[in-house]
Image (cartoon, helix red, strand yellow):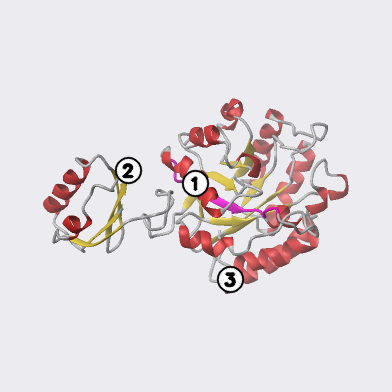
Amino acid sequence: MIIILKENCEKPKLDELVGWLERQDVKITTVTGTSKTILGLLGDTSKIDMESVRARDIVESVRRVQEPYKKVNRKFHPTDTIVEVSGRKIGQGTFNVIAGPCSVESEEQITLVAQKVKESGATLLRGGAFKPRTSPYSFQGLRADGIELLLEARKLTGLPIVTEIMSLAHIDLFADVDVIQVGARNMQNFELLKELGHCGKPILLKRGLANTLEEFLMSAEYIAAGGNTDIILCERGIRTFETATRNTLDISAIPLLKQYSHLPVVVDPSHATGITSLVEPLSLAAIACGADGLIIEVHNDPKHALSDGAQSLTPEQFDSVMKSVKKHAAFMRKEMA
């Protein structure tokens, strides 16, 4: 249930209303905007008489919320959430590009790519230290050593780092990571999501390969329920019957997620198709649909990459894509972070 209060409501009357609601065994989230105050009620609100609430002179309107996700619901939080990462803002008019290799392979590789993507305008550095792979015989990442190399690249370039966590057993290794990524395969690892709700770090949550938007937002709700609302949603393509591309980018998910939730949304055009030539057009489509950023794979030598070389741009290709991205972001009145 959502209660929208009138402007300049008297504090004693507000306190009395809140006290009465709390006695109904519901939790209350208060959102104070520039002109409106909203009370979001969490719990069993079926016993609360909407007409009794509406009759109070400080109440403008009352409505029930049917969606199972509450904390990440735009109805509870009408203004966009801005996630801050090392002084950079993600969401509400700013545009960020997260770029780097699929896997951290060596110090030379990650530092070279980090320098190149920064020169082209990337605002955050991505790189996989722990890699979930379909085959147990494929390269699984450098693990803790990979995180150390990312931290060295951050020292060199100043770019905040984004890397994927796969297990609760590894969480201590992520103490110095700027943004913790939850990959598509772990979108419904609920024990991991609950722990990340208490970690105090921004989370980049990727949509699962075959999950609905409601399931996606419910996973975000797990994190928010623990107190962490610094969540960045990432649309990275879903599995369909189409075989021409690795996945199918659900471009409609971008405006829908913006409609359903107040969280920022970024798009991963690399995983969405697995084809380098499609990264640029899908990046521009994402900008046109209102995305707050992109996450793009860049490798200095894609032909010899230890993972996902087929979808990785060279630094030169990335630089060309960034020229188009900057132009279209400016056209959409989004400021590059």
Q: Nearer the viewer, residue 164 or 55?
A: 55
Q: Nearer the viewer, residue 237 or 121?
A: 237
Is 141 on the left-hand or right-hand side of 168? right
Tell me residue 200's x, y (percent). Answer: 46, 37
Depicted 230 relative to depicted 315: above or below: above
Q: SS at mark 3? A: helix
Compare marks 3 and 1 and give the one earlier in the sequence: 1
Q: Residue at image x 65%, y 68%?
A: 285
Compare marks 3 and 2 and give the one earlier in the sequence: 2
Which quarter of the rendering shows the C terminus?
Answer: bottom right
Which amino acid, mark 2?
Gly
Q: SS at mark 2? A: loop
Q: In the rendered structure, does residue 89 fall within the stretch colored magenta?
A: no
Q: Residue at image x 69%, y 42%?
A: 127
Q: Give the labeled residue for mark 2.
A: 43
Measured Cα–Cα span from mark 3 to mark 2? 43 Å
Tell me residue 194's x, y (percent). Answer: 49, 35
Which amino acid, mark 3?
Ala
Q: In the picture, residue 280 is in which quadrant? A: bottom right
